[in-house]
Amino acid sequence: MTSIDRYAVLGHPIKHSKSPRIHKLFAEQTGQALVYEAHEVPAEQFSSAVETFFANGGKGLNCTIPLKELAWAFAEHKTERAQLAKAVNTLALQPDGSILGDNTDGVGLITDLIYNHGIKLAERKVLILGAGGATRGIIKPLFEQSIKSIVIANRTLEKAIDLETEFVNFGPIIGCGFEALNNQQFDLIINATSTSLTGQLPPLPANILAENGVCYDLAYSNCPTPFVRWGQENKALKSLDGFGMLVEQAAEAFFIWRGVRPLTEPVIKLLNDERLN
Ligand code: NDP
């Protein structure tokens, strides 16, 4: 008897996750036979939920807020990018029965910026707002695009300084508080705080976006997030949300699991038509 390969996303909350839809579209497009579900799993039930999923024949999992650090600790083997991020969003069953942990957020962001939005990153001065798990996952991928420098501004100063110390060997990087941003200008400002999820905005000084600068909110919503609106009000060349990143990181996870790379453009277009119209 053959059974269909099973995948799922775990998170808390998870009800509004778009991942099942995205992976269904990828599977249809590439002719892959699989099912992908969403399971609400609080942090304290994470290990037992993952063990049960794989014990029952599951092939791979995505993990989202607040489970990425737990997934990192759970994975027996980790890719280099997952090690650096200290957060795992993709678990994959290996042929020997072990579980590999990967982090596809960084490649998702870079692919969306460069290929979907045509943004040039070389020699750009980048400001990242926030110093959580998502920030950890995007620092090295940004430096790999030959950007000029990164400033990380965070509410809790200590966490920004810790990231500066940890990533200093990858390129010019400074950690600071929001008040230290006065009188500086950036070509690309990435909001990696979770403020948009509660309709808030980090405390940003005026005039920090350079002429023709770009704003990118990792969060996404069916209407412009507060940070996307801030970018529009501050005359950003483009002010984008993280929906494209969501689809791109999913495509990378699909590739890890299935060895097949889906086309993301038609999926982004279809889902954008649905969510924005
Ligand atoms: P974390 O919880 O790890 O980090 C949250 C960050 O937000 C911290 O730096 C925290 O600061 C900051 N923060 C929270 N509230 C405030 C506030 N009121 N004012 C200022 N700063 C605040 O979250 P993640 O790094 O995992 O995720 C960050 C965002 O990125 C989320 O919106 C998430 O949905 C999004 N994301 C999107 C992805 C996509 O595919 N599009 C992929 C991954 C993440 P402090 O340290 O002081 O607490």
Image (cartoon, rainbow, N blue to C red):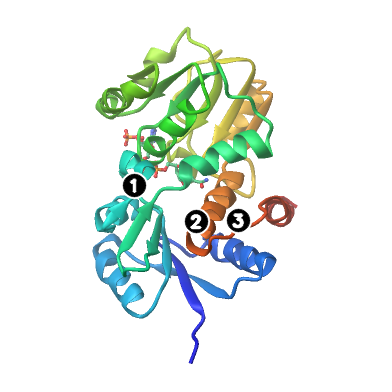
- Of the numbered discs 1 and 2, the one sitting upstream in the chain is 1
Which residue is most to the bottom? 1
The residue at the point 42 percent across, 66 percent down is: 60
Q: Gap between marks 2 and 3, in whole Å? A: 9 Å
Query: Could you say where residue 64 lies in the image, as x and y percent from the top left?
Result: 41, 55
Q: Residues within 10 Å of mark 3 (few under 14, many from 20)?
A: some
Which residue is at the front of the view, 122 or 267?
122
Residue named by callout 3: 261
Query: Could you say where residue 193 lies in the image, as x and y percent from the top left?
Result: 43, 36
Q: Gap between marks 1 and 2, in whole Å? A: 14 Å
Question: Under 8 Å from ligand 1: the CB of mark 3?
Answer: no
- Of the numbered discs 2 and 3, the one sitting upstream in the chain is 2
The residue at the point 35 percent across, 66 percent down is: 41
Residue named by callout 2: 253
Query: Could you say where residue 159 lies in the image, as x and y percent from the top left?
Result: 28, 30
Residue 160's mark? none
Which residue is most to the top? 183
Q: Residues within 10 Å of mark 2 (few under 14, many from 20)?
A: many
Residue named by callout 1: 87
Which residue is at the front of the view, 16 or 37?
37
Q: Amino acid at mark 2?
A: Ala
Question: Whereabouts is ligand 1, in terms of quadrant?
Answer: top left
Badge 2 element: helix
Camera-side mark, 2 or 3: 3
The residue at the point 59 percent across, 75 percent down is: 33
Is residue 4 among the parts visible in the rendering? yes
The residue at the point 31 percent across, 43 percent down is: 83
